[in-house]
Image (tube, rainbow, N blue to C red):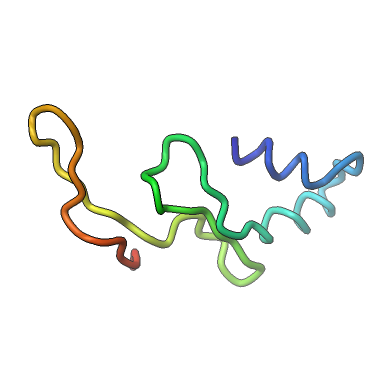
Amino acid sequence: MLTTKVLEDCGDDLSRQNIMKHAPALKNLALPGLIPGITVNTSPDDYRLITSLRPQRFDGERWVPMSVTMAAQ
């Protein structure tokens, strides 16, 4: 999903240079499979995709949030 988003942003120019222009420009991208409230962000100085966590525990039937979203170190 992430690769698809970057390639869509590139349009018809799929050169390495254009991909590297768009890959570090992701802002607040919510993806299926991520916990609600967790988004993907990149910048030219920071390629880490996920910089926040939201701990959850399984109560036997479903996943229950243990706390609010926190920064990942």
Query: Where, quadrant-wise, is the C terminus in this rendering?
Result: bottom left
Q: Is residue 16 left or right of residue 69?
A: right
Q: Residue furthest top?
A: 61
Front-most of residues 50 and 63: 63
Q: Which quadrant of the figure has residue 3?
A: top right
* Rendered view: 36 above or below 25: above
Where residue 10 appears, x then y in whole percent? 82, 46
Q: Is residue 10 left or right of residue 54?
A: right
Where residue 70 appears, x then y in whole percent? 30, 65
Q: Which quadrant of the figure has residue 72?
A: bottom left
Name the residue at 31% across, 61% down: 69
Where residue 43 appears, x then y in whole percent? 63, 66
* Rendered view: 53 above or below 36: below
Query: Where, quadrant-wise, is the N terminus in this rendering?
Result: top right
Name the residue at 68% across, 60% down: 25
Where residue 24 appears, x then y in whole percent? 67, 60
Q: Is residue 51 left or right of residue 7?
A: left
Front-most of residues 58 and 17: 58
Name the residue at 77% across, 40% down: 8
